[in-house]
Amino acid sequence: MQIAGREDMLTAILQLFWLLFIMLFILYPNFSQRLQLSYILRDLERKLYGLKRIREEVRSRTIETLRRYSGEDGVDVEKELDKMLLSFAITPESMDPYGIVYKLEHIVNTWEDTFEENVRRLCPKADNERAKTLTNLVEVARGIDYLYRVVRHYYLLGKKTANIYIVLQIQMLMPQLMEIAEAYRQACYAFMQGQPVGDGVGVLAAAKLVEGLEKKTYEVAKDTIVHELVMDGRKLFVLRAAGPGGSVGKPADGIIKILEREGEGVKAIVMIDAALKLEGEDTGKVVEGIGAAIGGIGVEKFKIEEIAKKHNIPLYALVIYESIGEAITPMRESIARAADEVVERVKNIIKSKVEEGSSVIVAGIGNTVGIGLS
């Protein structure tokens, strides 16, 4: 009897507890929202801590690498790095869009030159190629630092204002943001050691296309070289960034100079680049298309499209699928193998689209870190 009475009392207490809990939700509708907000903030705090650890790891690795190439012992590498991490470029005014592409190009060129100059001044022991790769390394550190500061901003803002909608948005994005952060962490190791990254597959394909062939190589634009040769009765201009330092070159300027010199003899432009794959698609898959296959802020793409339209030259594109993480991390075997397939497809395009005696430009787009001259 006593046991049955205790069970009845326990049941009554539980029922009363749930009744009070339900009444709280009814009488105080904000209670459930505050409870949910508290849970989300704790979850974000854990993930923000993980993001901070990645950021600190990349930062410490960057400082360690920069110190190996720094000159005087009195140079405060950490202080100089922090200055570069917080540096910025202001986009031009777009109220009147006329000429904005070339204004943006001027800003970006000045930004890149200044950034690389700061790295060179900080690391006088580094040669030209190493300085370019170190610049890429600092850009990786800057990327993860900015990502951390943005996530922290929305976490603190949501906590300060108790706004569940702010923290809900950042919570939904956190899986993708953590994936990007992990990619930055792996990219740090790639640029520290000068290893080829997935984004360099276009450059690798261009190098393989002319490998072992008799050619004339010269610089056609800043950090950009061209291999001039004859293949199957066609004159080829194989354009790519110069390596093995980390650089993407100026492919648009290179194409413009070649067209200015060769005139109407160029009958096609073939561009090779990495492309962002969709979930479920295979890494290293090669796909053909039409247009200027090049990423970035749009300046290079605009200039290539303009010159191609002016000379009425068709743009053929070959892209290699990979994820955003695979693009900035050490090149996977499946991506490297895809370069061989791209070479064969480029040869087929040249044979089928360009008649003998004509010229064709083949542009391998991407970061050339770890990929030297063939």
Image (spheres, helix red, strand yellow):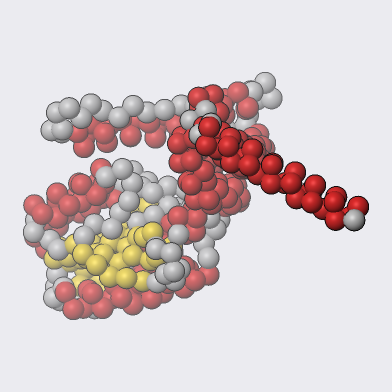
In depth, the one of 10 and 301 nearer the eye is 10
Q: Is residue 347 left or right of residue 53?
A: left
Q: Is residue 71 above or below residue 255?
A: above
Residue at the extreme top:
74
Name the residue at 44% across, 69% down. 280
Question: As drawn, is 240 to the left or to the right of 368?
Answer: left
Q: Name the one closer to the observer, 10 or 176.
A: 10
Residue 104 image-quadrant placement? top left
Quadrant where the C terminus is found in the figure? bottom left
x, y percent for residue 193 = 60, 51
Q: Is residue 148 visible?
A: no
Position of the N terminus, as image quadrant, is: bottom right
What's the residue at 26%, 64% (across, down)?
317
Residue 90 place in picture, x, y as percent = 33, 27
Q: Residue at x 52, y 28 (%)?
A: 162
Measured along the vertical axis of the image, is residue 332 above or below residue 83?
below
Residue positioned 49% across, 50% down in the render:
176
Residue 345, picture quadrant: bottom left
Closest to the observer: 247 or 214? Answer: 247
Q: Is residue 125 above or below residue 288?
A: above
Callout count? 0
Outermost residue to the right: 2
Q: Position of residue 311 (x, y in %)?
A: 9, 56
Q: Is residue 262 visible?
A: yes
In the picture as drawn, the residue positioned furthest to the front comes out as 1
Q: Is residue 70 above or below residue 47?
A: above
Give how far across and how far down residue 205 sits, in percent: 39, 66
